[in-house]
Amino acid sequence: MLSVAIVGPGLVGDALIKMITNYASLANAKSLPICVRGVINSKKMLVASSPEELVSSNYKQLLDSDRAEPADISQFIDNLKKVTQPSQTVIVDCTSNENIANSYALWLEQGFNVTTPNKKAFSGPLSYYNQLRALQANTSPILLHEATVGAGLPVLSTLSNLVASGDHIKKIEGILSGTLSFLFAEFSSGSTTGPSFSDTVKVAKANGFTEPDPRDDLNGMDVARKATILARLSGANIEISDLKLQNIVPEPLLQLETSDEFMNQLPEFDAHFAELNAKALANNAVLRYVASLDFENKSYSVELKEFPKSHPFSGLSAGDNIISFTTEYFPNPLTIMGAGAGAQVTSYGIFCDILKIAENSRN
Ligand SMILES: NC(=O)C1=CN([C@@H]2O[C@H](COP(=O)(O)OP(=O)(O)OC[C@H]3O[C@@H](n4cnc5c(N)ncnc54)[C@H](OP(=O)(O)O)[C@@H]3O)[C@@H](O)[C@H]2O)C=CC1
Ligand SMILES: N[C@@H](CC=O)C(=O)O
Ligand code: NA
């Protein structure tokens, strides 16, 4: 039985607990059993007394009950060790917290497997990234992060297979943000009569596409983090600062304290975005926020560009990601496309990692 410990049962973490609970009811779960063994948010934590105790229908009540303790991540890990073997356990970081991301090395050193949709550890300082790579040089414990790029789309597993096969990655291009894909497909769709920019941001947030603070999407950092992860997996030892980055958050809104204040003031800048759209339209083009990694010329960028209406990026469905790999084996690029954000598809990406870990821990 593989035990799963969820750090951060928010939008994505909650969907993952539902997915694991549903999986446990399937016939194939008998040969590869998986259970939720612990949950911790920023206030409370609970480690279950049995593999059956924590399920999607009761974990919130249990976290609110006397059974739960005040949150303390080190104590949570110690409590887990009392009921499970680290090698038979996977810690899933579903936060976007940097301190939690900085704990992976410690958890791996103790023998825990780790998977996460949190991009911070893999796009932060190269020294920490290399430390994590070194810690998983052996077959176990396993550290996986498929959902950090393209959510549930098989982007990182495909890239890892290309690299492991000896292929040479020449270029990666794509729309890597579900939020920015949604925003520009809705707002810059080849007309000036669509919804306002600020209304589109509200819908993207309501759909669960955005980061907890949507400025982390609009400032290009979320895409830059994903691009850094892709570059590093392709063999380029870059820091995030090596990317040319375009921040599209209006200057006066950068310093606002809360994301609520930002959302309230964004409508004041609708005219600015409408002007950018009108300019693109005058060129018979639409706006798309794209990442481009050109390994041969060592040129890396994430920016808002105009694309002719006939370009594949222009016709992408709102919210979808598209990622194309131009390689020695694939001069005509290998392209992956589909839903690139949202709680369910993201938790699917994490669940695929959990299945791989379950297979490995059975051997
Ligand atoms: N939404 C999407 O489509 C995708 C999201 N991701 C990534 O998934 C991650 C989660 O996103 P999402 O679910 O939307 O975020 P949410 O804000 O909905 O959830 C975050 C969770 O983390 C908890 N948390 C925050 N800090 C801590 C802490 N120090 N210790 C323990 N728990 C903590 C929060 O608890 P509390 O409620 O108590 O504050 C909450 O349960 C992010 O890293 C995001 O980038 C990746 C791909 C796609
Ligand atoms: N905010 C991100 C979520 C997934 O990483 C996005 O919009 O793509
Ligand atoms: Na993915």
Image (cartoon, rainbow, N blue to C red):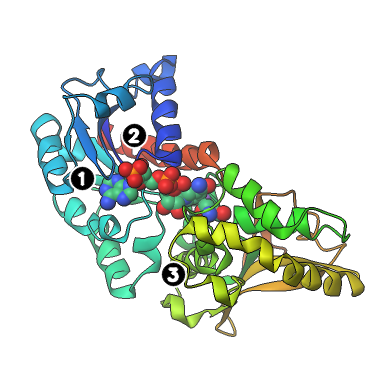
Q: Mark 2 — residue?
A: 359
- To which quarter of the image does residue 258 belong? bottom left
Decide: is 37 above or below 251. above
Q: In the rendered view of the protein, which quadrant contains the N terminus?
A: top left
Distance between the alpha carbons at the discs numbered 2 and 1: 15 Å
- Which residue is identified by label 3? 232
Residue at 64% x, 74% y is: 303
Q: Position of residue 182 (x, y in %)?
A: 68, 52
**Spot occupied by residue 269 in the image (x, y as percentages of width and height):** 68, 68
Q: Residues within 10 Å of mark 1 (few under 14, many from 20)?
A: many
Residue under pointer 1? 112
* Residue type beneath disc 3: Arg
Taking the image as shown, residue 110 lies to the left or right of residue 265, namely left
- SS at mark 1 in the image: loop
Could you tell me residue 331's position as x and y percent?
69, 67
Viewer-proximal residue, 361 or 283?
283
Q: Amino acid at mark 1?
A: Phe
Circle nearer the viewer, 3 or 2: 3
